[in-house]
Amino acid sequence: MRTLQLLPLLLALLLTHAACAPDPPAPATPAWPTTTAQQPGVALDGLVTSGVDEGCGDCHPDVVEAYTSSGMQHSLTLPTGDGSPEAAAVGTWIVHEPTGTRGRLELADGRYVQRLVYDDPTGVRRADHVFPVELIMGSGHAARSHLLVRDGVMFQLPLTWYAQLDGFDLSPGPGFRDGALRFVPQLCIGCHTGTVTPKDPNAERGYQGEISLGIACARCHGDGTEHSLDGDARSIVSPARLPVERQAELCFQCHLSGATELLLPGKTLSDYVPGQPLGAVIALLSPAGDGADGTSIAGHAARLQQSRCFAESEGLTCTTCHNPHEGHGDAATAARTARGCGVCHGPEACAEPEHGRGDRSCSSCHMPSVPSQDIVHTRTTDHRIQRRPPESTAVAGGKADLSLREDALADRPLVNLLDPDDQQPGARLAKAEGYLMGAELGRSPNGAPANGYLARAARIIDSELEARPDDARALLLRIRLLRVLGRPAQSLEIAEALLTANPTLVAARVEAGLAEAGRGNVEAAEAHLRAAWARLPYATHVPLALSDLLSRAQRPREALEVMDTAQERLGPFLELSQRAVVAALDAREFERALRYQWDVLLFRPREPMELAKAAAIAQRVGLPADVVQSLTDAAERR
């Protein structure tokens, strides 16, 4: 009774307190990144950013100003704040529907970060990995991928923004279905920046010094140091004065793609000088007679070369329709295209009635937009000019990822698009490497390599070694060939000879370790693989080989130490996590096994076998019964 009498007083006190209580604090203003897109002098881990101008704007301000509208200017940028695609996506969860992988973009301490998570069926977070966004690769016309820099080595992060979606999804390529980070090779970086200096040509990974934010002037005009001093037009490369073939190759650096692209032996991208043959530095390998519909995101030139217009006209090149100093999506491009077509075709050549054409250009009908074959959620202009283009049958994100495998299974000979007759030094070896890659990718279900490609590789390697018995690249390919054929003793003999002549040749060190492992020599194999890993700290294949060796030698705890270090450097990736689970169970370290199993479920959250495995380990370590049951139920539902 007394409680009822006190209720009015309590209510009055609560109302008085509410009236006097301070207003809740206003939401904090997000701490956006403070960098600008092309800000020079920003220190990354092992690199420093620079601009693309290189002083050219002092004498050519109009050209430099126009270039700011070009996608090439924005092909590599720094993260920016409010108003960017990243800012609009902060906090939105992205689920990759085919796999269930889940992540989002967040802000942390004034920088964007990507977060990958796995929450168990009860909603408890079990795996949580965060990666800072340090560079953005892609102009945004099609996509914007995020990069992380560690000791000058660049990695692509798992989430990419796609213009077609106006949002994020898993980054292109099958690799991100199995790993959080992917090493970005030289040829990818080279198409998004000016020349960067490799840190260690033998190690093949990492850069040092400056990295330009966007394609720098020197990529097409060469070193301008002398020209800036004397102003002489002859001391700088003017593409307009080059032969048509050399002009086109300036664009081919980034807009001619094949089944695989390889640097020639001993070459880096910085060896290419505008005006000289591009084929002296790069081999672009594609199957002979490839005329498939559709195009890769950077396959414009390959498709153009299949056109009758290109083959039968004199002087048709990329700059006929494109001004490289300006954006490509403006009305000026349509006008230039019409003028280019008008060289050979008058208005009467168009079958469309004049009153029905409107403002459409020739390209709108004869060069349609098609799905990109290699980058999901993107479209690109098909530069194979056709009178009546067929309906595109391209499957976005499909063919190019597996094309070399498909070519190997069909035993389609490879052609170097830049050097069809293999005249450049090292071109034949690059082709042999392409055949070896295809042979390994094209393994049959029983594990046998694609024999046709293997035989083609062997013939080239034999021929090259007959002419140059001491050629290191040819010897490395011979070692790799012998490994694929299962001949570790022969492969080891060559590897040891190579290491005697060049102890820093890390590829030979890896092959020696694999050969010793194949012969059962654990101590020698371990020494080679650890030495190689010290030179290639961000490689995936070396720690996988080393941990596999230690596991087979009944040393699971040491194998786990290797896997822990590899994950710390590279983030989680499926193959390592799956092996780590087995090693941890062998070592009876069940908590550790469960931690790695949660990482497996980052990439396979709907896989019944992996869910069941997580349930069994969770039960072994004593997790609550409802967690174990929820995992079991999820496995059974699948």
Image (cartoon, rainbow, N blue to C red):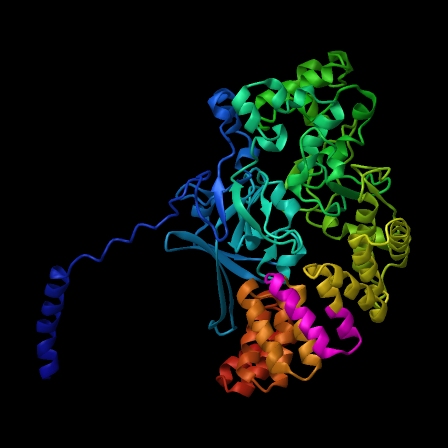
Report the quarter where the N terminus lies. bottom left
Compared across the picture, whether 96 is left or right of 338 comes to left
Residue 80's image quarter? Answer: top left
Residue at the (11%, 61%) spot, across then down: 20
Magenta-drawn segment: 513-538
Magenta segment includes 365: no
Q: How many marks?
A: 0
Against 407, is 14 above or below? below
Q: Nearer the viewer, residue 369 or 591?
A: 591
Residue at the (68%, 26%) spot, across then down: 364
Against 54, is 458 above or below? below
Q: Measured from the top left, where is residue 564 in percent x and y?
A: 56, 72
Magenta segment includes 517: yes
Compared across the picture, whether 108 is left or right of 307 comes to left
Q: Nearer the viewer, residue 105 or 94?
A: 105
Q: Residue furthest front?
A: 501
Against 164, is 511 above or below? below
Q: Main secondary structure of the magenta part?
A: helix
Residue 351's image quarter? Answer: top right
Q: Is residue 597 visible?
A: no
Residue at the (53%, 61%) spot, across then down: 102
Report the quarter where the C terminus lies. bottom right
Residue 75's image quarter? Answer: top right
